[in-house]
Amino acid sequence: MFQKLKHVKDKPDYTMLAIIILLLIIGIVMVYSSSFVWAEYKYADSFYFLKRQLLFAGAGVVAMFFIMFIPYTTWARYAKVILFSCFFLLIIVLIPGIGMTRGGAQSWIGVGAFSIQPSEFMKLGLIIFLSLYLSSNQKYITSLKKGFFPTLLLVFTAFGLIMLQPDLGTGMVLVLTCMIMIFVAGARISHFVSLGVFGLIGFALLIISAPYRISRITAFLNPWEDPLGDGFQIIQSLYAIGPGGLLGVGLGESLQKYFYLPEPQTDFIFAILGEELGFLGGSFLIVLFALLFWRGIRVALEAPDLFGRFLALGIVSMLTIQVMINISVVIGLIPVTGITLPFLSYGGSSLTLTLCSVGILLNISRYTKV
């Protein structure tokens, strides 16, 4: 199925690797800066979140370098096993007593003193399997019955299980990533138009079915209508970014992390970065993500086979979509979704799986001409 891989340059994309390490360092610094007040108050240890993030980052970096030397075609051989395992985890997390609930979503499974989030595993697992499927069945993708529908069935089955938790943000990232892959594979525009109509209807029903989602929409439209309730988080986020100005108030000098912005080390860490490092700091971070996207797309275009191209495209799309959604939420462009900022936000499953994903991307880069 795959041509024999030949080491064109036998080294990874060092520019991409440098960007990843720099993003990770910025993330570690900002996790500490944004969390030490809350950590001292809740755990009597201002380094609590920093120590755990360093542990997650250390494990993730080790995994990234290990995966970087595993030929990416290896993942094709185990794609079905990986996908089955991810579905299994998504099912058992819904079982009372096994799944842990945080923020209203039963999305975590406890493992000792830590926890894992199966939906994060599913994002990567589905990208791997879909890359294999599309590379093997690309000639059928223009057919609604033989190509387009089977992929949709798989994607929306995973989406449905994630929505049972519920976790709309992760589900959106998964669906959008897969849609990009299917579109690039050559699916008909007419099929996407039909899907878009049904998607809008389904999205509206998802919002109507859950009162808290309606509250998020109304809070997005006018957060000051309920400044101490549903609009509180986005208002505090804007209050953080606003005073940052051009250069920021200084690293570690944020006021919003003093119990104004809830858990600022997670989804809203970009708000603290904007407050402390200003417009220039936020712009520099966005430039780094743009450079990562550019290098990732080059790897996808130069990969030696279809599986590698789809796999690289899927990973780059997933990361880019997360960045765009997270920053858009923080600056008030879209409603709150609960999406972490890759490499920066505090969290074990998200950070570790992100680093594993870019490890695969770096391996693909070893076989490209660029």
Image (cartoon, grey):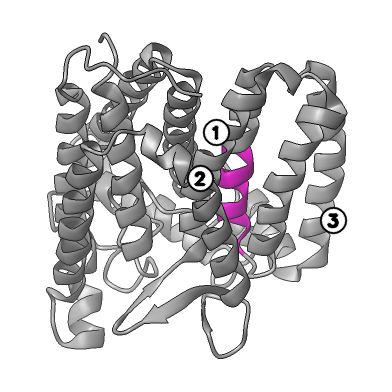
Please state the extent of the stretch shown in magenta in the rendering: 167-177
Q: Looking at the picture, which amino acid does disc 3 mark?
A: Leu
Category of crowding for the residue at label 3, using alpha-carbon neighbours closer than 10 angstroms: few (below 14), some (14–19), many (at least 20): few
Q: Which residue is mark 1?
A: 132
Category of crowding for the residue at label 2, using alpha-carbon neighbours closer than 10 angstroms: few (below 14), some (14–19), many (at least 20): many
Cα separation, mark 1 vs mark 2, equals: 7 Å
Q: Which residue is mark 2?
A: 79
Residue 260: tell me if it is visible.
Answer: yes
Q: Looking at the picture, which amino acid does disc 1 mark?
A: Leu
Q: Which residue is mark 3?
A: 205
Task: Tell me the mark number nearer the camera, choosing from 2 and 3.
Answer: 2
Which residue ends up furthest to the bottom in the rendered image? 97
Task: Tell me the mark number nearer the camera, choosing from 1 and 3.
Answer: 1
Q: Residue placed at 16% from the left, 87% from the top?
A: 44
Question: Callout 1: helix, strand or loop?
Answer: helix
Q: Residue placed at 84% from the left, 56% from the top?
A: 205
Magenta stretch prevailing secondary structure: helix
Q: Position of residue 175 (x, y in %)?
A: 64, 42
Along the line of sight, which residue is nearer the eye, 222 or 66?
66
Is the C terminus in the top left, top right, bottom left or bottom right quadrant?
A: top left
Along the line of sight, which residue is nearer the eye, 130 or 210?
130
Q: Earlier in the sequence, mark 1 or mark 3?
A: 1
> Which quarter of the picture shows residue 74?
top left
Along the line of sight, which residue is nearer the eye, 82 or 310?
82
* Vertical comparison of 152 with 95: above or below: above
Q: Earlier in the sequence, mark 1 or mark 2?
A: 2
Question: Dots 1 and 2: beta carbons under 8 Å?
Answer: yes
Question: Callout 2: helix, strand or loop?
Answer: helix
Cα separation, mark 2 vs mark 3, equals: 33 Å
